[in-house]
Image (cartoon, grey):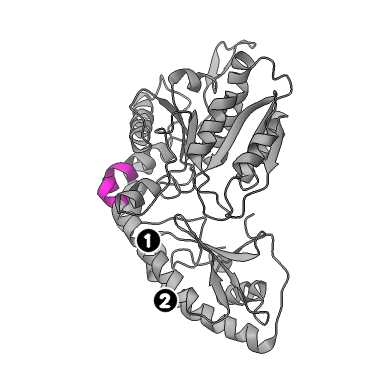
Amino acid sequence: MKAEDCDWYGGKVPGYTYKMGDDLDYVIREAYQLYFGENALGRSAFKSVTKLEQSIVGFCLRLFGHDGTGAGIFTSGGTESIFLAVKSAREWAKRSKPSATKPNVVMPVSAHAAFGKATYYMGIESRRVALGKDYRAHIEGLRAAIDGNTIMIIGSAPAYAHGNFDDIESLGELAGAYELWFHVDACLGGFVAPFVKRLGYPIPVFDFTVPQLTSLSADLHKYGYAPKGSSVLLYRTPEHKECAKFTFRDWPRGLYQTYTFLGSRPAGPLAGSFAAINFLGEEGYLDAARIMMSTKEKLVSGIGAIDGLRVYEPSDLIILLYDSVEPAVDINAVAEEMRKRGWFVGVVAEPVAISFPINPIHEKSVDGYLEDLRACVEVVRTSGKTAAYDEATYT
């Protein structure tokens, strides 16, 4: 069945998969297998699962600038983390902003689609505001969208579409001025940015050192190199975490209580995430960051050297965008030609450009990518080929 899948192991799939090495994969699989049958819903039955979660949350709080008095939840992915953040803000607002009878959430248009899913499911109004010219949150535009029913404001670190950080400090000031729940979506770059910063690259402030920040989400199954189904939602205080809790007694079985959307939860991802964190350690994550930034520099240089192409700057972390500045080179046609050569190519709608989210596995495929890209640009230039924008590259 895998015959038609893209070769992610060979580095031909930017995004979706994240790999640091065969040795790490082995350790994760062994840890996962140890918890293959356990159910993380059963905290009283499987006490070690609770210890795993507490250890992971503690590591993440420290990584993201918390003093240790915060709280967190291990979730099944960025979508569940985002869903629970919105749900938490709604429950918090019932007590803290009772006048907000028709709650809305204000965010840049670049905020992840999962926020749209969460507000849709919960019947909350979503207000998406156009970006500034630098493809970051437009602070004054967001301010204008806030009213008495606004309960929450969103920032991205970085946003998936363009790879740029919103101005989290300015968003925090805005949240403080209007007494809003402030969530930062660091699902993509959370486990890269702190280590890239330690390597000396300029990374904007985005974590709990911003005093108005209420919650932050980050995906371990991306650049934490943990198994799929691994993310964390972190809170400034345990009281904020209580806003995620669901309690139910109106049935014969008695108390049913969870902090997650899921009831039964696989314990394997918890064990695999614990293994990844402890196997790699901070030095392992620093090595991964070093590899990615080196690969990024090679891509920027190589793409910039191809006639007709332009790399978008700035790129704050590990997502590159590039497009065509030559009318004879249709960038959508270039993407189509690259797919014929076995590459999975994602495209962005605004601006129309090719997206390349870098991870360590691309160290071994970057030369082949650039070679094929040069050839595909020449095919499009000489043939005059054009193609329509393919919106189904993130489905």
Q: Spatial distance from mark 2 to mark 1, Cα to Cα?
A: 15 Å
Residue at point 37% right, 32% down?
Answer: 61
Whole-percent x and y of residue 324? Answer: 61, 74
Work out whether mark 2 precedes mark 1 in sequence or the reverse, and give the earlier one: 1
- Tell me: residue 17, above or below residue 181: below
Query: Which amino acid is tagged 2?
Result: Asp
Q: Is residue 284 magenta?
A: yes
Residue at point 51% right, 43% down?
Answer: 167
Instruction: Report the magenta stretch's main SS.
Output: helix
User: Image quadrant for the N terminus?
Assistant: bottom right
With 49 as the anchor, is 130 left or right in this view? right
Determine which residue is flagged by label 1. 293
- Tell me: residue 260, above or below residue 326: above
Q: Secondary structure at mark 1?
A: helix
Answer with the quarter of the image where residue 256 lies.
Answer: top right
User: Is residue 263 in view?
Assistant: no
- Tell me: residue 226, above or below residue 57: below
Stretch in magenta: 276-285
Determine which residue is flagged by label 2. 367
Query: Which amino acid is tagged 1?
Result: Met
Residue at point 67% right, 39% down?
Answer: 117
Whole-percent x and y of residue 395? Answer: 64, 54
Whole-percent x and y of residue 123? Answer: 73, 29
Would you call the spot at circle 2 few (<14 residues within 10 Å), some (14-19), or many (20 or more)? some
Residue at point 35% right, 47% down?
Answer: 28
Camera-side residue of 375 and 111 = 111
State which mark lies toward you, 2 or 1: 1
Whole-percent x and y of residue 226? Answer: 40, 46
Camera-side residue of 106 and 77 = 106
Which residue is most to the front? 140
User: Is residue 165 in view?
Assistant: yes
Q: Which mark is residue 376?
A: none
